[in-house]
Amino acid sequence: MNIAIFGGSFDPPHTGHERIVTKALEVLDIDKLLVVPTYLSPFKETFCAPAPLRQAWLSKLFEHEKKVEIFDYECNQKRQVPTVETVLHVKSLYPHAKLYLIVGSDSFLSLPLWNRYEELSHLVEFVVAPRGTFSPPKDLKILPINVNISSSKLRSFLDKRFIPKAIEDEVIAFYTRNPMDSRIEKIVTALSDKKAEDIQVFDMSGKDYFVNTVIIATTMGERHGLSLLDHLKTELKGAGESFLNVDADDNWTVIDMGDMLIHLMTPQYRQKYNLETFLKEREEEMKKVRGVE
């Protein structure tokens, strides 16, 4: 059995990725092609689109390719995963398979810097998708295409020529959304990753409240709220967020981010103080004041 592995952030998937998959299926003698979205690239500090959304885009993009599987191993780890770990996992599932690893030419040139490169080089045969000027070594497998687009460039200008039609509307909608939506999504994703429950977001803008957004989440126990606080600080430190004030204890942690307030509460405290009802009543009061039905 021959298997090709094609990993990347796919943030977002673009027509270059589409061409790489199509050409790999055409020129490589393979039985399966595993498209492997990272949870977070080992060479990056953060991502834009969350892993489940990137997986959904890839599934939609390649849904008619019978040999293509969207392989969720790295996303399920919820951490940075070195490629050699993923390859070893694939090897454990298919111990007798020959493995190809598809990389871009820029990645190929930096391979010696990859985690456990020597081990990786004995596990796979590299296949390179060129981008720009590239002089390949002798006997290196090359996909006869040239990909002149990257996800980071595409996020900058969202040129429809480079967005696959199957996911065009969703990609444009996501990367042009309100910046507040992006911030909220990062926070909700971080809380969800660490098992916070019943996460609710309240839009308080225009409702004569002292912040624009309130997020409430239930913790699993007295120490879980403090653990969630530490995780939020770690996840948001590179996103320019400011924790102006934190009032933390075992049962109720309040995080003031200036225009946003986050409440992390044990089930008992959430039931006792019932903030949801207060916030909803505030919204109704403001509707009456403004004469809005």
Image (cartoon, grey):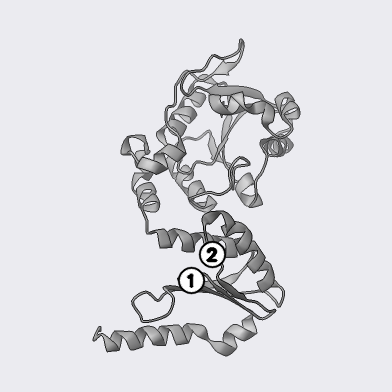
Residue most extreme to the top:
138
Amino acid type, residue under disc 2 in the picture: Ser
Q: Secondary structure at mark 1?
A: loop
252 relative position to 291: left or right: right
Percent position (x, y) of residue 290?
Answer: 26, 85
Coordinates of residue 214 in the picture (x, y in percent): 48, 74
The residue that label 1 is drawn on is 258
Residue in the image at 63% along x and 66% along y? 195
Please tell me how crowded label 1 is: few (under 14), some (14-19), or many (20+) other residues with Cα within 10 Å: some
Residue tagged by mark 2?
242
Q: Is residue 253 visible?
A: yes
The kind of residue tagged 1 is: Gly
Q: Quadrant of the C terminus?
A: bottom left
User: Which residue is at 65% across, 46% downward?
Assistant: 80
Decide if residue 292 is on the left or right side of residue 66: left
Neighbour tally class for label 2: few under 14, some 14-19, many 20 plus, Cα within 10 Å: few
Please, is residue 170 above or below residue 65 in the view?
below
136 up-or-down from 85: above or below: above
Q: Quadrant of residue 262?
A: bottom right
Closer to the camera in the image, 69 or 264:
264
The residue under the point 61% across, 62% down is 233
Q: Residue furthest front?
A: 244
For the residues labelled 1 and 2, the Cα–Cα distance comes to 8 Å
Element assignment for label 2: loop
* Residue 155 x %, y %: 41, 43
Question: Is the C-beta separation of discs 1 and 2 under 8 Å?
Answer: yes
Say which quarter of the image contains residue 225.
bottom right
